[in-house]
């Protein structure tokens, strides 16, 4: 909690604060301390990550873990957006829906005003790739908040907390259904520092997507296949990657159908329910089917991922005129590699289990797809937390989660040289404090029988 409080305080100076003079975040004006706040922010993040790693070495009950998660999230709920400016884009897109502007055709520049001014320039003219379920929620939050940006961000955080609550309830159930210790699943999938730092502090819609997805998968194990298909489809109508969960629903439904054409029957039933749910939600929200075409938005060369990084490197050495072709080549290579991995792990699902297979597949989508963000790793980590056996995969998932917390500044941007040095100093300072604190605790342990 000390780490979370430190980070929240640093966010008042170095977070993703509103710009343009439209509105300031409540609290003292610390903007002149933006540089030293980077050090304090990374100091807090390091404390939080270390606490999480140490928590993974002790036995705690579910109540204790959830209490810890609440203590970590509470300071961040009231802080400015951290590690991303996506919350402002969500509000702007919600306002576009309220104003009946086609979010699947136009970017936030069409809206204009204070909300659009908060969105980075590279995304001003980009249509949204999000589905109608999330847009309906963003529109409701935006309508209630009106022109109050701070209130809108807090409203989006409540939506994210709702998604985390679904995870906290259903992930242990799914772990038991997959034969995994629920406490270990809760530690890796929900207490994971990416959850408070990005899903809550960043107010990302991935929290709602993953909450609905895990709820649907758990219900599928209870043989409530139709309801499971509906929940997974709702998750996909927040963000498209969750649609992979429909494969799990169909695979679990298959053995309970007449043996003749059971596979086709399961696919048709699951697909039919998903199609009906999609049609009903799209009709109810009135956003139309433009989101289907907007799924190509993450393939933009402006996105950041392993494939686009290779594309940018290739552009530096490619002959004039071939730079864009090199970028597209690497993007399609990433997509091909992702498809191959997903197909392979799904082919091995009988040995791995369907949830484990989908976790590996979604991890490949997050890491090799055309757009990658630190919190995207949770797409794979959360199913793996519920289904992966103890071993190298869980260790890599934990180590990767810890490292990804340090990848971007609290402002949401990459560091320059000075900011990098300050961030490294914050990590080092936290390491020294933790080392001395541990030594002090071990010295006192015999006397107090800790």
Image (cartoon, rainbow, N blue to C red):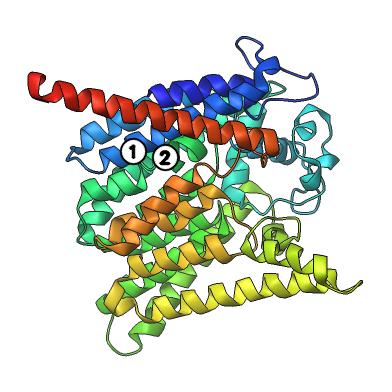
What residue is rendered at 64% in x and 17% in y? 25
Point out residue 376 in the picture as x, y percentages from the top left corner: 52, 52
Q: Earlier in the sequence, mark 2 or mark 1?
A: 1
Query: For the residue carrying disc 1, how many other residues have a C-alpha within 10 Å: few (<14), some (14-19), or many (20+)?
Result: many
Instruction: Identify the disc placed on residue 39.
Output: none
Visible in this render: residue 78?
no
> According to the image, label 1 marks what residue?
52
Q: Is mark 1 on a helix, strand or loop?
A: helix
What residue is rendered at 60% in x and 19% in y? 12
What residue is rendered at 60% in x and 65% in y? 369
Point out residue 130 in the picture as x, y percentages from the top left corner: 63, 51
Q: Is residue 391 left or right of residue 41?
A: left
Point out residue 251 in the picture as x, y percentages from the top left corner: 34, 74
Assess whether mark 1 and mark 2 are in contact (beta carbons under 8 angstroms): yes
Q: Is mark 2 on a helix, strand or loop?
A: loop
Q: Is residue 395 left or right of residue 197?
A: left
Indicate whether 22 appears above or below 119.
above
Q: Is residue 259 left or right of residue 327?
A: left
> According to the image, label 2 marks what residue?
193
- Whole-number angstrom distance, CA of label 2 to CA of label 1: 7 Å
Image quarter of the C terminus: top left
């Amino acid at each position: 909690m000390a780490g979370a409080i430190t980070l929240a305080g640093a966010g008042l100076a170095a977070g993703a604060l509103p710009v343009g003079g439209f509105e300031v975040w409540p609290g003292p004006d610390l903007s002149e301390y933006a540089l030293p706040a980077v050090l304090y922010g990374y100091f807090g993040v390091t404390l939080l990550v270390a606490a999480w790693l140490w928590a993974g070495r002790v036995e705690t009950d579910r109540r204790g873990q959830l209490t810890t998660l609440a203590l970590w999230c509470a300071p961040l709920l009231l802080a400015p957006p951290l590690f991303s400016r996506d919350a402002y884009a969500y509000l702007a897109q919600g306002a576009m829906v309220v104003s009946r502007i086609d979010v699947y055709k136009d970017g936030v520049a069409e809206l204009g005003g204070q909300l659009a001014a908060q969105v980075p320039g590279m995304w001003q003219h980009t249509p949204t790739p999000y589905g109608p379920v999330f847009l309906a929620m963003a529109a409701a939050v935006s309508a209630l908040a009106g022109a109050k940006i701070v209130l809108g961000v807090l409203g989006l955080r409540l939506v994210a907390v709702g998604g985390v609550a679904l995870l906290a309830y259903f992930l242990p159930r799914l772990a038991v259904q997959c034969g995994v210790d629920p406490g270990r699943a809760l530690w890796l999938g929900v207490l994971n520092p990416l959850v408070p730092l990005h899903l809550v502090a960043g107010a990302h819609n991935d929290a709602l997507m993953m909450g609905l997805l895990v709820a649907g998968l758990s219900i599928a194990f209870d043989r409530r296949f139709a309801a499971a298909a509906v929940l997974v489809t709702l998750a996909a109508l927040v963000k498209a990657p969750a649609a992979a969960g429909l494969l799990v629903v169909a695979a679990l439904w298959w053995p309970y159908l007449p043996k003749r054409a059971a596979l086709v029957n399961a696919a048709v039933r699951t697909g039919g329910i998903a199609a009906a749910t999609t049609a009903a939600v799209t009709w109810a929200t009135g956003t139309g089917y433009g989101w289907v075409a907007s799924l190509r938005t993450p393939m933009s060369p402006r996105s950041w991922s392993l494939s686009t990084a290779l594309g940018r490197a290739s552009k530096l050495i490619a002959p004039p005129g071939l730079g864009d072709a090199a970028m597209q080549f690497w993007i399609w290579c990433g997509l091909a590699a992702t498809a191959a991995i997903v197909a392979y792990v799904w082919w091995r699902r009988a040995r791995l289990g369907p949830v484990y297979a989908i976790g590996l597949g979604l991890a490949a989508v997050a890491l090799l797809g055309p757009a990658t963000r630190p919190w995207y790793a949770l797409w794979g980590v959360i199913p793996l937390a519920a289904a992966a056996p103890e071993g190298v995969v869980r260790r890599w998932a934990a180590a990767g989660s810890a490292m990804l917390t340090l990848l971007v500044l609290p402002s949401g941007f990459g560091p320059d040289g000075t900011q990098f040095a300050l961030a490294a100093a914050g990590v080092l300072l936290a390491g020294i404090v933790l080392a001395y604190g541990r030594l002090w605790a071990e010295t006192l342990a015999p006397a107090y029988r800790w």
